[in-house]
Amino acid sequence: MARPRPEPMQVVKQRRDAALRALVEGVPYIRFLNITFDRRGDELTGVLNFDEKLIGNPFLPAIHGGVTAAFLEVTAVITLSWEHMFPRIESGEIEANDILTDDSIRFPKTIDFTVDYLRSGLPRDSYARAFINRSGRRYASVRVEAWQDNHAKLFAQGTGHFLMPQSPKPNE
Amino acid sequence: MVDKTELARQFIEAIPHAQALRLDLTRIGEGEAEISMPYNEQLIGDPRTGVVHGGAVSAMLDTCCGAAVMSHPSAPGGTATIDLRIDYMRAATPGQKIHTRATCYHITRNVAFVRAIAIDDDSERPVATASGAFTVEGR
């Protein structure tokens, strides 16, 4: 049996990019920190675009530890939401415009988050990638790593647990 | 001797990110610190409810823990976070100020141990708690 003809690349790219943009740009705090995401297929890399207002120690100078924690957590939540929704984005069930308007589309909630600070964050762009250790029906465990110039030299890593969105029960 | 409390206050207020979050150091000394943050629409994490993003609460808790370490009588100078764990109990109520209180409950020559809590107007139900280890830097 012949496999169905693949969709044109532009259609696939446009759909994925529009969904990712809606997911990220709809959140004021992500814009406040100026975090953006690079996408290759379904793989995401968070980018914390450097700005003076992210500094926590003006004498070194170094990025604020709280900003690093927030960057890791944002990368974890976006990656988890993205992977959770990806099949429904691909099938066309979820459209970019629905992501922040449709109340039935819910996001994972952070239960706890732990950050290891490995070296100080320099005043330049930072990158982060999240790996989903386990994503069950109710809970998910996610590990995130962050680096600057050299991917082999992480400046922070984190682990978090998340409560996955529950699909509403029929008579609720 | 330099007034360490005043020094810590100046240090916190000079932090660009603390200014961006509009953090206000309301009390500091003897290894304890309190910081409050006004509600700010730029910090919203869920645009459908207006709830402040957990990351902003983390940044506040981290700053508050650092301030507590610096104000400890046995801390000679600055500090940096080694690790910090945040537990999120509930969403902060939109429109309300968030307050954090940190205590440096043990300090050695090299490490300071700190815990902190974040609340809003309903002080009976914590928004988040934090616990972490911080470096003890010489002058």
Image (spheres, coloured by chain):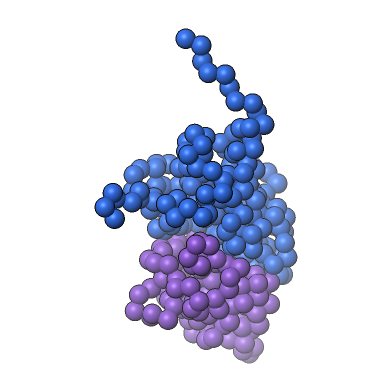
Chain colours: A blue, B purple
Q: Where's residue A156, x and y in %?
A: 57, 53
Which residue: 47% across, 36% down? A87
Q: Please give left or right for residue B93 compared with residue A122 in the image.
A: left
Q: Where's residue A161, x and y in %?
A: 41, 52
Which residue: 72% across, 70% down? A59
Q: Is residue B39 visible?
A: yes
Nearer to me, B136 or A168? A168
Q: Is residue B93 above or below residue A25?
A: below
Q: Is residue B76 above or below residue A117?
A: below
Q: Is residue B68 above or below residue B27?
A: above
Which residue: 49% across, 34% down? A91
In which quadrant will I find the C terminus of chain A? Answer: bottom left
Q: Is residue B49 above or below residue A84?
A: below
Q: Is residue A116 visible?
A: no
Nearer to me, A8 or B57? A8
Q: Please give left or right for residue B31 compared with residue A153 in the image.
A: left
All told, the count of numbered labels is: 0
Name of the residue lying farthest toward the left: A171
Q: Where's residue A150, x and y in %?
A: 68, 44
Nearer to me, B23 or B131? B23
Q: Where's residue B96, x and y in %?
A: 49, 78
Name of the residue lying farthest toward the top: A1
Which residue: 60% across, 62% down? A28
Nearer to me, B30 or A67? A67
